[in-house]
Image (cartoon, rainbow, N blue to C red):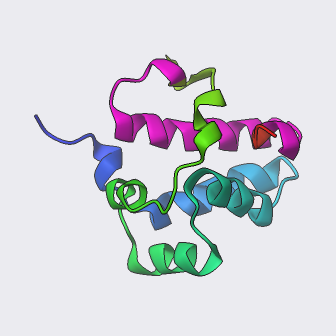
Amino acid sequence: MSKHKIFTMSFASVYPHYINKLEKKGRSKNELDTIIFWLTGYNESELQQILDNKTDFETFFNKVPQLNPNVTKITGVICGYRVENIEDPLMQKIRYLDKLVDELAKGKAMEKILRT
């Protein structure tokens, strides 16, 4: 079975689209980075290295320092699928990030996005 196209896409190619989506809604790159750091455990320099190296999504998520233990609190529909029911672990992690970006774009408070 072939890999899903998004698995082999570079994170750096999608990151600017996340930023544009959020800035159009009055949110910031710093807020995006905050949710990425919360979800993955990466820090600023590690994220910059991922962007510079054009790391693909599969590697990005396979090398996560520590997936946030509250990740299971991320629920709801993204791209027509309930994130909590996605069976492929890698696709689920990608959709978790998509869901967090959507929540940020919709104006949800950061405290709620970060499940605090």
Q: Quadrant of residue 92?
A: top left
Query: Which of these two is toward me, 84 or 52?
Result: 84
Question: Residue 31's x, y, as percent?
Answer: 79, 58
* Image position of 81 (left or right of 112): left
Task: Indicate the quadrant containing the N terminus: top left, top right, bottom left or bottom right.
Answer: top left
Using the rendered image of the protein, determine whether residue 82 is visible from the camera's viewpoint.
Answer: no
Query: Which of these two is toward me, 40 or 101?
Result: 40
Residue at image point 82% right, 40% down: 116
Residue at image point 53% right, 76% down: 46
Using the rendered image of the protein, determine whether residue 35 is visible from the camera's viewpoint.
Answer: yes
Question: Residue 88's x, y, as percent?
Answer: 33, 31
Residue at image point 67% right, 40% down: 100
In the rendered view, tell whether residue 76 sits above or below residue 35. Answer: above
From the image, give the main secondary structure of the stretch colored magenta. Answer: helix
Query: Which of these two is toward me, 4 or 93?
Result: 93
Residue most toward the left? 1
Residue range corresponding to the magenta coloring: 84-112
Residue at image point 65% right, 29% down: 73
In the rendered view, tell whether residue 53 sits above or below residue 99. Answer: below
Question: Residue 79's x, y, as percent?
Answer: 52, 26
Query: Which of these two is toward me, 70 or 61?
Result: 70
Q: Quadrant of residue 47?
A: bottom right
Residue 110 on the magenta segment: yes
Question: Residue 97's x, y, as percent?
Answer: 57, 44
